[in-house]
Image (cartoon, rainbow, N blue to C red):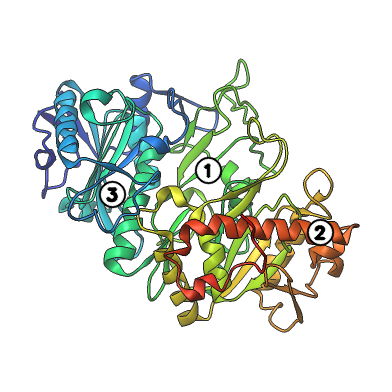
Amino acid sequence: MKETGHKSNAVGLESIGIKEAKEVLWNLTPAELVEEAIKNGEGVLTNTGALMCDTGSFTGRSPKDRFVVKDEKTADTVWWGDINIAFDPEKFDQLQEKMTDFLKDRKLYVRDAYAGAHPDYRLNLRVVNTQAWQNLFCNDMFLRLTPEELKDHQPEFTIICAPEFKADPAVDGTRQENFAIINFTKNMILIGGTGYAGEMKKGIFGVLNYILPQERQTLSMHCSANVGKDGDTAIFFGLSGTGKTTLSADPERGLIGDDEHGWAKDSVFNFEGGCYAKVIDLTHEKEPQIWDAIKFGAIVENTRFYEGTRTVDYTNKSVTENTRTAYPIYHIDNAIEPSRADIPKNIFFLTADAFGVLPPISKLNTSQAMYHFISGYTAKVAGTEVGVTEPQTTFSACFGAAFLPLHPTKYAEMLGKKMEESHVNVWLVNTGWTGGPYGVGSRMKLPYTRAMITAALNGELNNVTYTKHPIFGVEMPNSCPNVPDNILNPRNTWSDKAEYDAKAADLGSKFVKNFQKYSAFANEEILAGAPNVEVTA
């Protein structure tokens, strides 16, 4: 087996059953991987030096094809169901053997790295790829080893990713030809049949979402985080379209990370070494940090050029709306390295409430914070998906249900305990509609939202008076610097107050109905955070 590159002296590929391959290239530099990708026909360079690649028929994750091996370790700990679909351990072993056999005649790219910027919680990784650009993706997304660390690197979790390998569902126990399977006993993830690189990133996130809370008593979070000049950390939770990336990107504050973090006893730390951002309709004016980060060493996925040029047309949706870029965090000027800062002083739950009900900013007590954390609410507006003609509620537990191996109440209880210990402020921020629902009211102005977040960060909302929302019970400030007083209570912005009251009650009942699937596992403190509504069957 021909091997080149910088290889660890500690453990080879034999430990995972790969005893022969056409060629193995270990820990190539970004420049070498770009050369390999272009030579292999995997991508082309853009005018900024970024590598443009396509992910094939899968332009996003495939949640119905994500499995977790159900064995003695996981049977009683994993939250089984539509999110964590059980997979037979013997089928996993058979599939691993088939994959390693498939790799015998292929050139392999191996990346040694780690996840977790806190030295006490890091997870050593090894990724085996059949495509050079996917290995570059792993170099960008995971934390990079120093030459000294590489010498004796021993992986604790391994990913084998072969997009060209397709499963036989009838034989292998998968649903389709594509799959992503986590095995917590063998410390391994098998990915095949899909070229979407995000499966690797989110696979390791799922692993950390199990190991840290279950085995290390450390909260894992699907959030962005930044830190001020005085060391005050803020974390931002929010589903797609709520403004999480935009609002956490602040030139006055250092970026800790944009997506995945842990909350240890002494700090908040990034799991990753890079960012994976959507680029649909990207402009320098809207997102200067992301725009400037797309340079040599970065990747753009499923994008297209302006005709006759190497300039990316970010408005082009011909492949998918889920066009993305991956880049190492040091491409962001104000990123801090190592990606770690003090425990948070402020937490923001971001929601784009298309019903125009929730206040633009409100303060939550511990019960409400846990309840809203489990709820993970936002709303889709008309036109965002086929068949969506009016606002629809979207709930995703802990603002990331798709990546949670444990029951959501486990994470919520840990959050509540952290809140009590650290006296952190938790704010619910509505970046959605005011003055009425979508189609009647208007979208909250971004400068107002930024002003409210700035006021919360600066402690300027600590000494103002508050009004309790009659349905949700959250505390609404009666004044905020640089924000008109009349928009702080959403009821005041509606011309028909009775219509607002009815809409608020209706949204509250939707929260309660959604929460019914968790209520049997929730303690009294969490249940106390529910909206004050009568729910009929």
Q: Position of residue 84 (x, y in %)?
A: 35, 46
Please, what secondary structure does the residue beneath circle 2 have?
Answer: helix
Label 1 neighbour load within 10 Å: few <14, some 14-19, many 20+: some
Q: Which residue is mark 3?
A: 113
Q: Nearer the viewer, residue 274 or 45?
A: 274
Per the rendering, the mark at residue 500 is 2
Q: Nearer the viewer, mark 3 or mark 1?
A: 1
Q: Position of residue 366 (x, y in %)?
A: 54, 75
Q: Position of residue 124 (x, y in %)?
A: 24, 54
Q: Earlier in the sequence, mark 1 or mark 2?
A: 1
Q: Nearer the viewer, mark 2 or mark 3?
A: 2
In the image, residue 294 above or below residue 340:
above
Amino acid at circle 2: Tyr
Gap in angstroms between the C-alphas marked 3 and 1? 21 Å
- Evaluate if marks 3 and 1 touch, with contact meaning CB atoms under 8 Å apart: no
Q: Nearer the viewer, residue 42 or 17?
A: 17
Q: Position of residue 237 (x, y in %)?
A: 55, 58
Q: Is residue 278 left or right of residue 205?
A: right
Please, what secondary structure does the residue beneath circle 1 have?
Answer: strand
Q: Earlier in the sequence, mark 3 or mark 1?
A: 3
Q: Which residue is mark 1?
A: 277
Q: Nearer the viewer, mark 1 or mark 2?
A: 2
- Quarter of the figure with the C terminus: bottom right
Amino acid at circle 3: Ala
Image point (73%, 40%), residue name: 390
Image point (36%, 35%), residue name: 65
Amino acid at circle 1: Ala
